Image (cartoon, coloured by chain):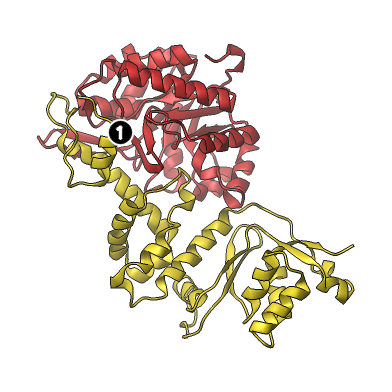
Amino acid sequence: MTVTQDQFRAALLDSAQAVPEGLLDANHGPAGRRFNVYRNNVAVSLTEAMHQAFPVVTKLLGAQNMDGLAGIFLRQHPPSSPLMMHYGEAFPEFLTGMQQLSHLGYLPDVARLELALRRSYHAADSTPISPEALAIDPEMLMEATIEFAPAMQLVRSEWPIASIWTFNTQDGSPKPQAVTEDVLITRVEFDPEPHVLPSGGAEWIDALMAGKTIGEAHEIAEGLSPGFDLGATLALLLQGGAIITLTTKG
Amino acid sequence: MLDDTRKSNHLPLTAGVGYKPQHFSDILENAGPVGWLEIHAENYMGDGGRPLAQLRHMAERFPISVHGVGLSIGGEGPLDADHLDRLKQLIGWLNPASFSEHLAWSTHGAEFLNDLLPLPYTDASLARICDHIDQVQTHVGRQMLLENPSSYLAFAESTWSEPGFLHEVAQRTGCGLLLDVNNVFVSATNLEFSPQGYIDAYPLDLVGEIHLGGHDEDEDDHGKPLLIDSHGREVVDPVWSLLDYVLERSGPKPLLIEWDTDVPDWPILRAEAERGQAALERVPA
């Protein structure tokens, strides 16, 4: 009459399965619905974690619909680590696969944005460079490379995800327009903030993250988005404390 | 077995509370009798940001107890080496006054199930848990306290009583014990044993910390009371009485109020801590 943790776990996440024999009540009868306490604890705590992790997705779907989705998600994708702060990494893909949500095409990217905001919130602290550090010979600047703050995140989307996020979190925000939005997340002290990047900005940052120089990255961004606004992109990064080192050659 | 010189427990013999970020300013303004704070280890294993900044700030003002909820000491599989490293790192920089974990399992294979799941009290589970605790104490480099669970059911295969099992684990590993008085009351109600009898059988001299929290009430298939350890409300009077019964026998101990769901405004939690502090002060040192 031993109950293995395999058996326990199988019944835990599947309420259609019988409660393992060998689990008893006080009078040595079958445990019955006492086992449901554990089933509920797992389902309720993980559902609650999903609500906390994805407040805007929850608002867009409605809390009850989110409960239903979370119930399916948590059984397909239980947490893979005790660090619940990172739970839900598979949620955007999961949403993409839900056919009944295909009319809400932006939902997976909104979930990606919420994940990125959370990663930023928990990322390591860092000390940004001062804007004056960029006041060097322009040729030297073009040959310099940049290291970004761990709290900086980039989320690219075909949807207006930053506007959707703002519209659902801040009263009086304008209604989202049908545009694509690449989002830069910066964290000056403790609170991550999303900003919409100008066209080409995401390519420029991507190239720098891959180790290209400022000049090389500029060529890439300019090639993809003629008229790329380097100044505006740089201003967002500097104001957000997102550049932590500038390495010049020689 | 842990060397005696590496045992350290400096939690004050006062009331403490489970720290919630929403109480940050309130605690700094008026902590009342609260002399120490407990954190859930896993919430402070990020790389930076507000959680760690708040914790550093609080740790300069209060002794901190690190309470793990994710180590899965009772798991059939091996302990998660990455998680052990994270614990070691947290405890290394924070140097908390106490470190504790649960007699339970929560990880199965690659899955973390986010609940404290029960285990049978057998010679086999005893040996496994002692191995795991040895590994934890060696890796982290300090003594841990082991907490008794809330039970909703029993295992037919169990051959040890829970107090006997905990006593044996402590003797074999040198770990201390965390006595959750609400859990004793919940388990005693659910499994129909005497909570005072449990306390009489329990090695109170090994207790480094006491927990108190609120529970919910439900019923089993036969209409019998089924109490659920929810940490979502005030501690009920019979649990306060059981605390008095414990303290009369143990003397004063660091006493924690846990309130983890439907967290109230600070004055309500502080009032619970005041009630706990009053219970401690009734006991001769």
Camera-side residue: A182 or B187?
A182
Measuring 13% from the left and 24% from the top, which residue is drawn there?
A27
Question: Which color is chain B depicted in?
Answer: red
Residue A88 lies, in percent from the top left, at: 43, 56
Task: Using a 10 Å C-alpha cutoff, classify the residue at mark 1 as few (fewer than 14 neighbours), some (14 to 19) or many (20 or more).
Answer: many
Instruction: Using the rendered view, name the quadrant where residue B127 is placed.
Output: top left
Of residue B258 and residue A167, the one placed in the foreground of this image is A167
* Element carrying mark 1: helix
Q: Position of residue B35 (x, y in %)?
A: 55, 32
Whether residue B245 is visible here, answered yes or no, is no
Which amino acid type is shown beneath numbered disc 1? Answer: Gln
Residue B276, given in percent of the width and then of the height, sits at: 43, 29
Image coordinates of residue A19 in percent, x first then y, are 18, 37
Q: Is residue B211 above or below residue A250?
A: above
Q: Which residue is mark 1?
A: A5
Tell me: A61 left or right of B145. Answer: left
The chain carrying label 1 is A
Count of numbered tags = 1
Name the residue at the bottom extreme. A227
Decide: is A214 above or below A16: below
Q: Is residue B193 left or right of residue A125?
A: left
Q: Quadrant of residue B220?
A: top left
Apparent side of residue A161 relative to residue A142 in the rendered image (left or right):
left
Q: As rendered, which of B114 and B220 lies closer to the eye?
A: B114
Q: Residue at x 43, y 41 (%)?
A: B269
Instruction: Indicate the chain coloured yellow by its letter.
Output: A
